Image (cartoon, rainbow, N blue to C red):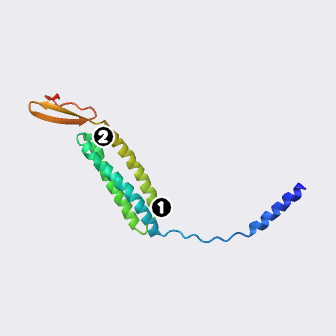
């Protein structure tokens, strides 16, 4: 009895499986639509990152090593952003590869920003005095120049 039921179910699935339901074709988005979506998505995120980079400039002005890292990161950021925008305008470039590249670079810049923001938060500013001359020194471990005393 169980064999007959199993055989019946097997035959019924073969018969039902032969006729596949008709599906309507899904229209894939055009390249222009993909580019527009990508530009909307990444323009806001890259604008936010660029604003964060610029906000770090005054905070790291007295820390020469961090300032050089910040300058290099901003130059790299602008080059990457320009390359992404040029590749989106080029009809021969795949949108998927550009999207993957943008996501990768966005992640890298987030790491760099996080490290620089950490350094900026740890920066301390002290005031040093020598006669009537006052200097402000900012660094991770600020030290007054020779001849100056900490106020």
Distance from the alpha carbon under mark 2 to that under mark 1: 36 Å
Residue depicted at x 33% and y 56%:
79
Label of residue 96 in the image: 1
Q: Is residue 125 above or below residue 73?
A: above
In this rendering, which labeled residue sits more in front, label 2 or label 1? 2
Q: Residue 50, percent across and down?
A: 32, 53
Q: Is residue 70 left or right of residue 15?
A: left
Q: Residue 76, percent across and down?
A: 33, 52
Q: Earlier in the sequence, mark 2 or mark 1?
A: 1
Looking at this view, name the residue that lies furthest to the left: 132
Q: Residues within 10 Å of mark 1 (few under 14, many from 20)?
A: few
User: Which quarter shows the N terminus?
Assistant: bottom right
Label 2, secondary structure: give it: helix
Q: Quadrant of residue 19?
A: bottom right
Label 1, secondary structure: give it: helix
Q: Is residue 22 left or right of residue 151?
A: right
Circle 2 residue: 120
Residue depicted at x 15% and y 35%:
135
| Residue 93 appears in the picture as rendered | no
Q: Residue 89, percent across and down?
A: 38, 67
Residue depicted at x 28% and y 34%:
140
Looking at this view, name the residue that lies furthest to the front: 151
Residue depicted at x 79% and y 67%:
15
Q: Is residue 75 left or right of residue 13?
A: left
Q: Is residue 7 left or right of residue 99?
A: right
Q: Quadrant of residue 59?
A: top left
Q: Is residue 83 above or below residue 30?
A: above
| Residue 10 appears in the picture as rendered | yes
Label of residue 33 in the image: none
Q: Is residue 49 above or below residue 63?
A: below
Q: Residue 144, percent across and down?
A: 19, 30
């Amino acid at each position: 009895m169980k064999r007959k039921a199993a055989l019946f179910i097997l035959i019924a699935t073969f018969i039902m499986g032969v006729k596949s339901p008709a599906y309507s074709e899904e229209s894939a988005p055009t390249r222009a639509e993909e580019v527009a979506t990508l530009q909307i998505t990444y323009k806001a995120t890259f604008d936010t990152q660029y604003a964060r980079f610029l906000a770090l400039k005054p905070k790291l002005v007295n820390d020469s090593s961090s300032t050089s890292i910040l300058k290099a990161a901003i130059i790299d950021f602008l080059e990457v952003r320009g390359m992404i925008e040029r590749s989106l305008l080029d009809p021969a470039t795949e949108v998927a590869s550009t999207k993957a590249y943008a996501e990768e670079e966005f992640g890298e810049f987030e790491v760099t920003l996080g490290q620089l923001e950490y350094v900026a938060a740890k920066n301390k500013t002290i005031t040093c005095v020598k006669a009537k001359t006052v200097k402000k020194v900012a660094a991770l471990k600020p030290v007054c120049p020779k001849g100056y005393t900490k106020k």
